Structure formats: structure tokens, C-alpha cells
């Protein structure tokens, strides 16, 4: 797992040269084979693209498309440019060159400085555990050491008084130390954890940090990702809601019947799919978008849309050749950030006969609507969106616009993201259904019965998250749920906070409780809250933007919200990590269960991180379940409690055993007698 030595091709001044991977240094230019292979270092992709399996690092079983690093003055940052970085230990499934004959990457890190090296280092040297049992155990062992020192002094004095030979005195004095501080204590404590680890492995749960098994027995709060964790991985497309003018049309259950136009082109091309041995691979949502438009993959472009020939009214609406191509998948090289952090993605599309390229954008409806020209957004946009999210559907907004300032696709790809993603025209809504896993409600109810808090942390829409939480039992049918809306200071107004019952949230009207905080631009004074959250409120739900406002402008109110918070929606990966850390500050022993790369930070920050991955083990979290079900959470808690209880019992047994033997030995030394060593010998020996 740690040592990796392969032959790689490196560009040298005299030409290409094959060297051992151990000789690589940052700055070397690698020529990647098109058939793929293991990466021996971290490298930035500068030419071509690669389909990479990163399951050994992130636990994400879905292959990831890596594109070439965009041109520009911005410095290279591994975290910001993850979509353009090949990490050590990952498997390149396929490499393709577009400009030139080779796929090129520049080495950025080697050895323990790589992402894999850092993870291996964290395994070898994990962060210290803040566990009272371990702290008290060390204090007790220290106390036993003091007792052993006193016993040693007493035994030396006693043996000298009894005129025992000096050599015998040294041996007997050292015996007292080993009796008072049992040397078998660490081994006995380790065996408790190892048995629990073996039982977890037999149930498909792998652990790389055995010390955290005992922490599983102390869990009082567990955070869950939604998509792929609480709900199924796959998405069922319910249909598309097209837009005509400023009015939404009825839901079209078969998008392939849509007329050829911007909406159909956006559905067919706005994705991150790639071909792997003639099979499309990529995000599950993108995989569902291809079949609904009858899209196929060509050899020169990443996506080709062909209209169905059986529909007479669609014939003759495309230029000869009947295809439109797309390039710049995952957003043209205009942004180094990940789509999960941006909550959107963009592509630049060109098709035969088009006067200029076209930009297509998809993402969260609220964000995409904010990027669109207000004249193209219907007045009932929020109501229509809420009607779908309240029913538990996942909604993605589609927008686009022509790029008249560019004459070619290559020129369009040099535009910055801000120039592409402004004054867009809203095209429609893609409505998908994400069903709960059958095991989810039972597990959630079992956790709640044992007084373990369950929290949902998702990047999906707030209303969709509320519906899923109510469906799986996180929020009971008779329990109150209040939506928290927070707004930052703007136009001289202080930061504000609104508490809105879920009934009024669904009806878009109703009483609201308003909280205000002095603006940060005002003279410094102690913030005064006019109203605080209802202490009888069972659950609070808030979005990532509201969470950010709470952290920055309402730090004293944040703990009260976190204590009652159950649903956190539209959370960026960094916010998930921050949420886990804030909960730990409240003395919670926090567990995190997720399935994707977006949860890596939270999984590592949590006291007990459980990754749902098809890989045998993932180094991104202490626990990895090979079965994509949250049933592994009760398993970890159950085995953690068993291990913790056994550890307590073993520790008490070893401590009492050592103290009993210690006192017995001192009494026998006092009367000049020691324990017999042989079974057939006399039970006592007189010290002479």
C-alpha cells in the first residue's frame, strides 16, 4: 500500500526517457500512457484528460474525469485544482490526448508529501484521541508506578533487614515493579479492540484506526449525508419542466420529445461523463441525463445529441449531419473550483451550422436563477420549485446563452467563468426522484430510541432535505420543525435571523420570529438578541448560507442552534467539516457517515467517520463499510460499546489482580517467604 515503484516516461531536454518512479522530483514532466496505470506521485494535468479511480483515497467508487489545468495567472493550489490533479496511488483507467500526441502531467509532490503519503502518515501517526478512559487509564498507571516505587523501597529495606544476598534483593525488588504495574495490561487492552475489529470485518466493516472502535461506544450524535447514504445512489428522472417566455409548461415525462433547442442541447451536453472502453462513466445524475435525450457519445466530441427519427415534427430542425458537439465538460477552463463547492457546472457547446458557441449551465435552482436575467425567470419560480421539493423531488435548473463575443469554440474556452455565467436565460427544470433506502427508517428509529441524535448534512435543497428527514423518521410526525433563515448585513441593515415554522414555510406565509444583531460596522458593543429560539422546539433546519451567517455574525447563538439543529442543507464540503468541528466543541462525540468525496473532510474531522464504499478499505475515514447501507452505524456503535465495556472489565481485573498480588508479595517478604514457582514444589519458599 505504501511502497510503489513503477517505470515512468519523463520528458528530458534530450527527449523522452524511462526512469524509476523513485527518481521523480517536483517539476518533472510525465508522459502518461493512454492505457492508464497507477500514479506514483501527485501531478498536475497540463495536456489531455484522464478517467481516474480514486476509491483508494476518497472511497468514491465512481470514476472521476480529470481535465487539463486551465491557463491563467492564478497560482496552482492542489485543493482548489482537484479536478486537474492526479493523486498518488490512484488508478488511471484511461488517458486521452487532444492537443498533441501525448497526455502530459507535471509532478508536484512525491513521497510523504503527496495526498496518499499524508494519509499513510495519518495512519502511522494518528491524531491523539481525547478520550477520558485513556486519560484516566494513564493516570491510574502513573499512580501504580508511584505505588511500585514505594513497594520497591519497602521490599529492599525488608530484605536487607532479613540479611538476603544483594543479588537476590535486586531481583526481588524488580519483581515488585512488574507485579504492581502489570506488563500484560497493554496487550490485554489491545485484544479487546482486536476482537471487535475482527467481528466488524466479518460484517463488511473495515477499520484502519482500531483505537477509535471504543469511541464508537461513546457516540451521542451521528451526521448523515443524504444522497447515496440515506437515499439510493441512482436517480429516477421524472421529467423536464420547459420554459416558454416567462411561464412554465407542464412536466414533460419524455424529454426526448422536446423540440431541438437550447434546453435539449443543455440536457445532452451539460455533464461530466467520459467514455471508458465504449461505456459512459461519471456522476449518477449525469448518467441518467444521457438516455432521456437519446444522447450518444462520438469519438471527436464528448457528447453528441441526435433527435429521434420517429418524430416527424422534429425532422429537418437540425443541420445536415444531425448532431451537436460539446467540449469543455465540467465547466470550460474558467474556474479551478469543484462543482460541489460551486453548486453548478458549465460547458461551452458548438454544433454544425451554429454562428457562435453557446454556454450551458446547470446547478441548484436558487443559484442558477441568481445568474439569470430576471426577465427570463418566471414570477412563480419559487412556488413551482417548492411544489417539487416539498414532494421530495430533486430539482436541477438549466440555463444558457449564446456567446456572441467569440467566433470559435477555442476562443470561448478562454473566457473567465464570470463572463460566461452572467445574464443567462433560464431554460427549464430537471425533476428527479431519489428514493429512501429500505434500511434507512429502521436504522434512524433504532438510533433515536437509544437517545442518539441524528443529523442530516446535505448539499441538496432545504425543502427536499426536510421531506427526506420526515420520511426517514429524523423528524417525527408530531414534532415541531422550524426553518432558520439568516441574512448577512447589507445596505446598512444589521444581520437578521428568522425562525419560520415548517407549516408556514410550506405555505410561504405565516408568522415569523425575527432576530437582529448589531451590524459589524457599528461601534463595538455587546450584541443583544431580541428573541431566542423556542426552547421547546424539537428540530431546527437551515441552509449552508444561513449557517455561514450564524458562524460569522451570531457566534453566541450558534451553540443553541446546533443543539437543536437536525437538518443542514445546501452545505458545501468545507461547511460540513466546520459543522462537525463546531459540534465537537459542544462536547459531542460526533460520528459522520457519508459515501462521496464531498464528505472526506467531515469524515476525517469526526470522532468516528464511516465511509460507504465498494472498496475494501478507504484511508479517508477510520471505518469503511463495503455495503452501501447505514446499517453499519449500529454495528460500529454496538461493537464499540462491547469493546468499551470489555476494556473496562479487563482494566479493572488487571488492576485488582496486580494490587492483590502486590500486597501479598509485600506481606510474604515481611515474613521472609516468597511464592513458589513450580507446580510440584512446595507452595512457599523460605528466603534464606
Image (cartoon, rainbow, N blue to C red):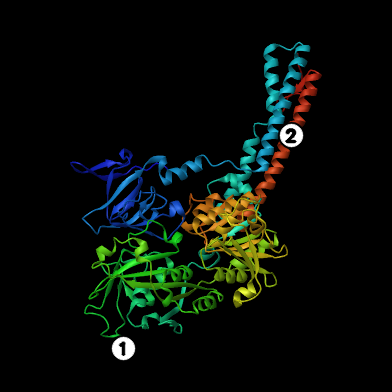
| Residue 138 percent across, percent down from the top left | 66, 35
Residue in view at x 46 percent, y 85 percent: 250
Closer mark to the observer between disc 2 and disc 1: 1
Q: Is residue 498 left or right of residue 612?
A: right
The disc at residue 657 is: 2
Lower position in the chain sequence, tag 2 or tag 1: 1
Q: Secondary structure at mark 2?
A: helix
Residue in view at x 58 percent, y 51 percent: 581
How far apart, in angstroms, are the residues tagged by discs 2 and 1? 89 Å
Does residue 613 appear in the picture of this structure? no
Residue beneath disc 1:
313
Of 605 and 645, nearer the camera is 605
Residue in view at x 36 percent, y 62 percent: 417
Where on the picture, by quarter, is residue 164?
Answer: top right
Q: Is residue 269 above or below residue 195?
A: below
CB-based contact (under 8 Å), mark 2 and mark 1: no
| Residue 576 percent across, percent down from the top left | 54, 56
Amino acid at each position: 500500500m505504501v511502497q510503489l515503484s513503477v517505470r515512468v516516461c519523463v520528458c528530458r531536454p534530450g527527449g523522452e526517457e524511462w526512469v524509476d518512479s523513485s527518481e521523480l522530483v517536483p517539476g518533472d514532466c510525465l508522459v502518461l500512457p493512454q492505457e492508464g496505470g497507477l500514479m506514483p506521485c501527485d501531478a498536475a494535468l497540463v495536456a489531455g484528460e484522464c478517467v481516474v479511480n480514486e476509491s483508494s483515497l476518497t472511497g468514491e467508487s465512481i470514476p472521476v474525469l480529470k481535465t487539463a489545468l486551465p491557463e491563467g495567472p492564478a497560482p496552482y493550489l492542489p485543493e482548489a485544482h482537484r479536478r486537474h490533479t492526479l493523486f498518488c496511488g490512484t488508478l488511471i483507467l484511461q488517458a486521452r490526448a487532444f492537443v498533441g500526441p501525448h497526455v502530459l502531467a507535471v509532478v508536484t509532490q512525491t513521497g510523504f508529501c503527496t495526498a496518499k503519503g499524508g494519509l499513510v502518515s495519518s495512519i502511522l501517526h494518528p491524531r491523539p484521541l481525547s478520550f477520558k478512559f485513556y486519560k484516566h487509564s494513564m493516570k491510574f498507571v502513573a499512580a501504580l508506578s508511584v505505588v511500585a516505587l514505594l513497594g520497591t523501597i519497602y521490599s529492599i529495606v525488608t530484605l536487607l533487614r532479613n540479611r538476603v544476598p544483594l543479588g537476590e534483593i535486586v531481583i526481588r525488588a524488580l519483581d515488585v515493579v512488574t507485579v504492581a504495574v502489570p506488563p500484560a495490561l497493554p496487550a490485554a487492552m489491545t485484544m479487546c479492540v482486536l476482537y471487535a475489529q475482527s467481528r466488524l470485518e466479518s460484517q463488511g466493516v473495515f477499520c484502519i484506526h482500531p483505537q477509535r472502535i471504543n469511541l464508537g461506544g461513546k457516540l451521542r450524535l451521528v451526521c448523515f449525508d443524504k444522497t447515496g447514504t440515506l437515499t439510493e445512489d441512482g436517480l429516477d428522472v421524472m421529467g423536464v419542466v420547459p420554459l416558454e417566455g416567462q411561464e412554465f409548461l407542464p412536466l414533460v415525462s419524455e424529454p426526448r420529445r422536446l423540440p431541438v433547442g437550447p434546453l435539449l442541447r443543455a440536457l445532452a451536453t451539460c455533464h461530466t461523463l467520459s467514455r471508458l472502453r465504449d461505456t459512459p462513466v461519471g456522476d449518477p445524475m449525469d448518467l441518467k441525463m444521457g438516455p432521456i435525450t437519446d444522447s450518444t457519445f462520438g469519438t471527436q466530441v464528448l457528447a453528441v445529441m441526435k433527435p429521434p427519427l420517429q418524430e416527424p415534427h422534429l425532422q429537418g430542425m437540425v443541420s445536415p449531419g444531425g448532431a451537436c458537439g460539446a467540449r469543455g465538460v465540467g465547466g470550460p477552463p474558467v474556474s479551478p473550483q469543484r462543482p460541489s463547492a460551486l453548486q453548478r457546472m458549465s460547458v461551452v457547446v458548438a454544433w454544425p451550422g451554429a454562428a457562435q458557441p453557446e454556454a450551458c449551465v446547470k446547478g441548484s435552482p436558487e443559484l442558477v436563477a441568481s445568474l439569470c436575467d430576471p426577465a427570463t425567470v418566471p414570477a412563480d419560480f419559487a412556488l413551482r420549485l417548492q411544489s417539487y421539493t416539498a414532494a421530495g423531488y430533486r430539482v436541477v435548473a438549466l440555463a444558457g446563452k449564446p456567446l456572441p463575443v467569440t467566433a470559435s469554440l477555442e476562443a470561448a474556452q478562454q473566457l473567465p467563468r464570470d463572463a460566461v455565467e452572467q445574464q443567462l436565460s433560464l431554460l427549464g427544470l430537471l425533476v428527479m426522484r431519489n428514493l429512501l433506502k429500505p434500511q434507512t427508517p429502521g436504522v434512524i428509529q433504532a438510533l433515536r430510541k437509544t437517545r442518539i441524535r441524528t443529523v442530516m448534512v446535505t448539499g441538496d435543497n432545504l425543502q427536499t432535505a426536510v421531506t427526506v428527514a420526515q420520511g426517514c423518521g429524523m423528524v417525527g410526525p408530531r414534532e415541531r420543525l422550524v426553518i432558520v433563515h439568516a441574512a448577512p448585513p447589507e445596505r446598512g441593515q444589521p444581520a437578521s435571523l428568522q425562525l419560520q415554522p415548517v407549516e408556514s414555510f410550506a405555505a410561504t406565509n405565516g408568522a415569523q420570529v425575527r432576530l437582529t444583531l448589531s451590524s459589524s460596522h457599528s461601534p463595538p458593543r455587546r450584541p443583544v438578541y431580541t428573541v431566542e429560539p423556542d426552547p421547546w422546539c424539537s428540530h431546527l433546519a437551515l441552509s449552508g448560507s444561513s449557517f455561514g451567517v450564524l458562524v460569522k455574525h451570531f457566534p453566541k447563538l450558534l451553540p443553541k442552534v446546533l443543539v437543536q439543529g437536525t437538518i443542514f442543507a445546501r452545505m458545501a464540503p468545507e461547511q460540513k467539516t466546520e459543522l462537525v468541528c463546531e459540534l465537537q466543541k459542544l462536547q459531542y462525540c460526533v460520528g459522520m457517515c457519508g459515501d462521496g468525496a464531498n464528505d472526506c473532510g467531515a469524515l476525517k474531522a469526526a470522532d468516528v467517520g464511516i465511509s460507504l464504499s465498494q472498496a475494501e478499505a478507504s484511508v479517508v475515514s477510520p471505518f469503511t463499510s463495503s455495503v452501501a447501507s447505514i446499517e453499519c452505524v449500529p454495528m460500529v456503535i454496538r461493537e464499540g460499546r462491547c469493546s468499551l465495556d470489555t476494556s473496562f472489565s479487563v482494566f479493572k481485573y488487571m488492576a485488582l489482580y496486580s494490587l492483590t498480588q502486590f500486597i501479598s508479595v509485600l506481606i510474604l517478604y515481611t515474613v521472609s517467604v516468597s511464592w513458589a514457582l513450580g507446580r510440584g514444589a512446595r507452595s512457599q519458599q523460605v528466603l534464606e
